[in-house]
Image (cartoon, rainbow, N blue to C red):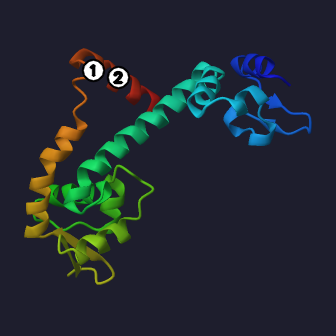
């Protein structure tokens, strides 16, 4: 199968089939030794462009969403690195602060976390070790643990929030109307 045929197949939404019978949904999934010679011999950027151009509109959208997530995540990591906390730890501290002196449970933190795949217990343990959060046995249910933000956690949170807000600013790339439309489209994807 040559590159032209593969590209046409992928644009039509079909899978690529190789001589040995294996199938790849995208050129990127094809093992290197089975990718078309023209693709193997080009520099990486050209190969990535060829792969991207071979995707259907739905696949391109998913690739763009993942790339955008990675770009935002890398930007936030770079901004948070000097503070010594991770993005997930920052979000846990914000949740704890929003409790207004009312302790939180691990389950409450899990429900409110942005990254549902994160291990809330481990994040809390790191915050406790850094002195940014405290953990105590719940007075009315000895099986539960109450988690609160400490004064040191509040201080760090205040100093890092301006960094976070600056990192989240994409106003120089999109105007307010575009941001509103973009948010509406993202919400419609999830609901």
> Which of the two labelled residues, at mark 2 and mark 1, occupies the earlier sequence position?
1
Q: Which quadrant of the view contains residue 137?
A: bottom left
- Give coordinates of residue 95: x percent, y percent: 22, 56
Q: In this view, does 52 lie to the left or right of 20?
A: left
- Please tell me how many numbered marks the rendered image carries: 2
Residue at point 28% right, 77% down? Answer: 145
Q: Kindly identify which numbered label has been placed on residue 31.
A: none
User: Callout 1: few (<14), some (14-19), or many (20+) C-alpha neighbours within 10 Å?
Assistant: few
Return the x and y of residue 107 as percentages of the image width and height: 35, 64
Image spot of residue 111 (x, y percent): 35, 55
Which numbered disc covers residue 174? 1
Cβ atoms at labels 2 and 1 below 8 Å apart: yes
Residue 26 seen in render? no
Tell me the distance, in whole angstroms, between the alpha carbons under discs 2 and 1. Answer: 9 Å
Q: Which quadrant of the rendered structure holds the C terminus?
A: top left
Q: Is residue 158 left or right of residue 30?
A: left
Q: How dense is the environment of label 2, judged by Cα within 10 Å: few (below 14), some, or many (20 and up)?
A: few
Give the residue drawn at x 41%, y 39%: 69
Quadrant of the image occupied by residue 155: bottom left
Location of residue 161 in the rendering, given as x and y in whole percent from the top left corner: 14, 49
Kindly state the secondary structure of the residue where label 1 is placed: loop
Residue farthest to the right? 20
Task: Tell me if 142 is positioned left or right of 149 in this view.
Answer: right
Between marks 2 and 1 in the image, the one whose residue lies nearer the viewer: 1
Q: What element carries label 2?
A: helix
- What residue is shown with label 2? 182
Depicted 3 relative to depicted 69: above or below? above
Observer-nearest residue: 166 or 2?
A: 2
State whether residue 44 is above or below residue 131: above
């Amino acid at each position: 199968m040559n590159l032209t045929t593969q590209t046409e197949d992928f644009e039509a939404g079909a899978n690529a089939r190789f001589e040995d019978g294996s199938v790849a949904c995208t050129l990127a999934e094809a093992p290197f030794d089975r990718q078309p010679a023209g693709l193997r011999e080009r520099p990486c950027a050209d190969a990535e462009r060829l792969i991207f151009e071979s995707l259907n509109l739905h696949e391109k959208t998913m690739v763009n969403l993942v790339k955008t997530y990675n770009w935002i995540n890398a930007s936030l990591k770079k901004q948070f690195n000097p503070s010594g906390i991770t993005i997930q730890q920052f979000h846990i501290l914000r949740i704890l602060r929003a409790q207004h002196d009312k302790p939180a449970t691990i389950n409450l933190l899990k429900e409110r976390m942005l990254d549902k795949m994160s291990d809330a217990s481990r994040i809390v343990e790191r915050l406790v070790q850094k002195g940014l959060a405290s953990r105590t046995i719940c007075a009315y249910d000895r099986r539960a643990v109450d988690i609160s933000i400490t004064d040191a956690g509040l201080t760090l949170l205040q100093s890092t929030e301006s960094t976070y807000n600056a990192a989240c600013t994409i106003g120089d790339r999109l105007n307010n109307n575009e941001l509103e439309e973009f948010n509406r489209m993202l919400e419609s994807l999830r609901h």
